[in-house]
Amino acid sequence: MTLKKGGGALRQRIDSSDQGTAAAGQRPAAFEAKEVAFIADVQQVDLKKQTVTLRGAQRTVRLKIKDPEQLKLIKKGDQVEGVFAEAIAVAVIPAPAKAKK
């Protein structure tokens, strides 16, 4: 995430995704990847709990900030710009052969 001191931009969320499957004749497999780019307003900074509350275009979230020095730079009214990504993949592989007795 990138801190934008003083804010001023519109909160926004841009979703994108990609997906695919195995080609015909191959073992079954598929993937899906999602990415969310956002600009959010800093609503609250809690130095004791080391959290910031961000209000985005669709929801409000509270995030834990691990680095206290970075947390000191964030103030209510600032904005953050960032990207959140997640992906999942599935593949079918043959079971191992059973050992003969």
Image (spheres, rainbow, N blue to C red):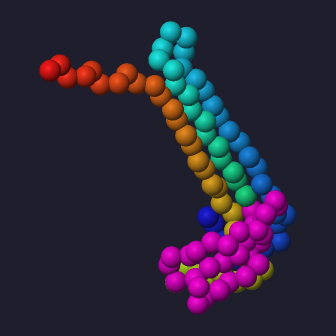
Quarter of the picture holding the C terminus: top left
- Tell me how many marks there are: 0
In the figure, residue 7 lies in which quadrant?
bottom right
Residue located at (52% from left, 35% from top): 89
Q: Is residue 9 left or right of residue 16?
A: right
Residue 54 visible in rendering: yes
Q: Is residue 95 above or below residue 86?
A: above
Q: Is residue 56 above or below residue 28?
A: below
The spot of residue 6 in percent (x, y) is 76, 78
Return the residue nearer the eye: 95 or 76: 95
Please state the horizontal and vertical placement of residue 33, each as a whole percent of the image: 61, 40
Q: Residue furthest bottom?
A: 48
* Residue visible at 73% across and 58% down in the picture: 38
Q: Is residue 58 above or below residue 24?
A: below
- On screen, residue 79 versus residue 51, left or right, reads right
Q: Residue 90's x, y, as percent?
A: 51, 32
Residue at x 71%, y 69% (from the top left corner): 61
Secondary structure, magenta segment, majority class: strand
What stretch of residues is rendered in magenta? 39-68
Point out the residue furthest to the front here: 101
- The quadrant of the rendering that contains the N terminus is bottom right
The reply to whether the magenta stretch includes residue 65 is yes
Query: Which residue is drawn at the image coordinates 75% and 62% (left, top)?
Result: 39
Evaluate whether residue 79 shows in this view: no
The front one of 81 and 60 is 60
